[in-house]
Image (cartoon, rainbow, N blue to C red):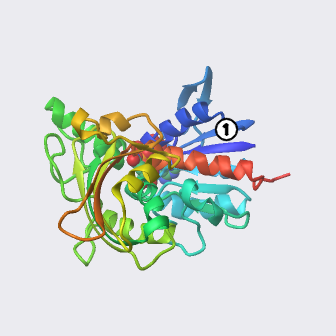
């Protein structure tokens, strides 16, 4: 099994390497891949010096699985070339998510969307992954009618460039141009994640709409979101108002969430127990708390959900998909 980590020098790529060590994914060979800027760079890892190779060299080396964390335009250009060589591409960008021929997968929810014929598998947006993890058990039991979401998203969700902008502003140094964000992110909140669309929502907000419906296989769910970038160094949070199709009992909801693999219920406000992004950091699970009835409307509850955007929001989910491909013996190159 030959694994390629594409975008290995980036924030997500580095966490993919951590995950490979933690999960002990079985592979015989690993390739470190990044842009031409990084080709030849040495990355020491597990006691070995790995040399970063180019996309051309990576595709020629015919990996079995490539985990892509290198942005949408790179994925659009290169994922089909890797796939053509017989490689499974697990893609962290938004490039393939809404392609009807590509599965959009959160393994706990819809691993069954994967088969050996679909070589490009899309990892959903980080905000979507943590939200559907919390909502899927409720969807299966009560049916989701409408979601009203506000996000509080770490600047690490925008990659290395945003980290540099935050650190420069914090340290009073000049910010590298072009900036990750038009406004300062240090000591600020920016109600814009990604660019604006004609309907006045941002791309990030509409990803949450379309990707949620695709993963949960229900185009009828009504969804509206406001995505906000906050000066948090890792970890996304979401306030989700969930209108269900059927009446619910709060204890049953809590028990359901607490017993769902991949979710940790932290819900004892009297003891200051509720999720925060800091508590999510370096964890693979999605944390859920502040579970309460919306007293202004029937069949409706409020949730607060946090997760490490670089882990379950990206690297963890991608490595879980790779593990699924291996477990199901879908990787078969001989
Ligand atoms: N950050 C998150 O929380 C998060 C969550 C979910 C999904 N994602 C997605 O994951 C991807 C990576 O995000 P990130 O935060 O890790 O970004 P990042 O820190 O900016 O890293 C980008 C990586 O992509 C590589 N790259 C850029 N252009 C390339 C090219 N033409 N060919 C090959 N490699 C290229 C970079 O290599 P060089 O170092 O050589 O430039 C670097 O390794 C993005 O598509 C992002 O939307 C990110």
The local secondary structure at tag 1 comes to loop
Give x and y (percent) for residue 63: 71, 48
Which residue is painted at 52% across and 44% down in the image? 316
Disc 1 residue lies near ligand 1 with CB under 8 A: no
Dividing the picture into quadrants, the one containing residue 187 is top left
In-image side of 296 versus 46 (left or right) = left
Front residue of this view, candidates 126 and 238: 238
Front residue of this view, candidates 144 and 27: 144
Give x and y (percent) for residue 26: 72, 37
Which residue is painted at 37% across and 38% down in the image? 280
Which residue is painted at 60% across and 30% down in the image? 21
Which quadrant holds the N terminus?
A: top right
Location of residue 23 with respect to 158 vertically, above or below: above
In-image side of 225 versus 107 (left or right) = left
Which residue is painted at 52% across and 66% down in the image? 96
Q: Residues within 10 Å of mark 1 (few under 14, many from 20)?
A: some
Furthest toward the right, the residue is: 334
In-image side of 84 versus 9 (left or right) = right
Furthest toward the top, the residue is: 47
> Number of marks in the image?
1
| Residue 251 seen in render | yes
In-image side of 45 versus 285 (left or right) = right
Q: Which residue has dot 1 on it?
A: 25
| Residue 58 seen in render | no
Dividing the picture into quadrants, the one containing residue 319 is top right
Give x and y (percent) for residue 246: 38, 72
Location of residue 125 with respect to 162 vertically, above or below: below
């Amino acid at each position: 099994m030959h694994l390629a980590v594409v975008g290995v020098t980036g924030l997500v790529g580095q966490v993919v390497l951590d995950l490979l060590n933690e999960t002990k994914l079985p592979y015989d060979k690993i390739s470190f891949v990044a842009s031409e800027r990084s080709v030849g760079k040495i990355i020491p890892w597990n006691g070995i010096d790995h040399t970063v190779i180019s996309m051309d060299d990576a595709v020629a080396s015919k990996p079995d699985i490539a985990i892509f964390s290198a942005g949408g335009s790179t994925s659009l250009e290169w994922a089909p070339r890797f796939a053509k060589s017989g490689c499974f591409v697990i893609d962290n960008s938004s490039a393939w998510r809404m392609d009807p021929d590509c599965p959009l997968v959160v393994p706990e929810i819809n691993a069954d969307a994967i088969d050996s014929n679909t070589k490009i598998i899309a990892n959903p947006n980080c905000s979507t992954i943590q939200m559907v993890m919390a909502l899927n058990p409720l969807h299966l039991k009560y049916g989701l009618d409408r979601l009203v979401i506000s996000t509080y998203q770490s600047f690490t969700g925008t990659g290395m460039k945003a980290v540099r902008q935050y650190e420069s502003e914090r340290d009073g140094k000049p910010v590298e141009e072009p900036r990750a964000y038009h406004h300062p992110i240090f000591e600020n909140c920016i109600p814009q994640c990604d660019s604006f669309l004609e309907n006045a929502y941002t791309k990030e907000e509409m990803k949450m709409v379309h990707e949620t419906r695709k993963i949960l296989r229900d185009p009828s769910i009504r969804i509206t979101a406001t995505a906000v970038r906050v000066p948090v160094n890792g970890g996304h949070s979401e306030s989700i108002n969930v209108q269900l199709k059927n009446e619910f009992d709060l204890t049953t909801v809590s028990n359901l969430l607490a017993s769902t693999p991949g979710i940790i219920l932290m819900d004892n406000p009297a003891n200051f127990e509720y999720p925060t992004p800091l508590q999510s950091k370096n964890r693979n699970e999605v944390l859920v708390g502040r579970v309460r009835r919306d007293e202004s409307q029937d069949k409706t509850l409020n949730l607060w959900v946090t997760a490490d955007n670089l882990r379950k929001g990206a690297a963890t989910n991608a490595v879980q998909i790779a593990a699924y491909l291996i477990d199901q013996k879908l990787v078969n190159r001989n």
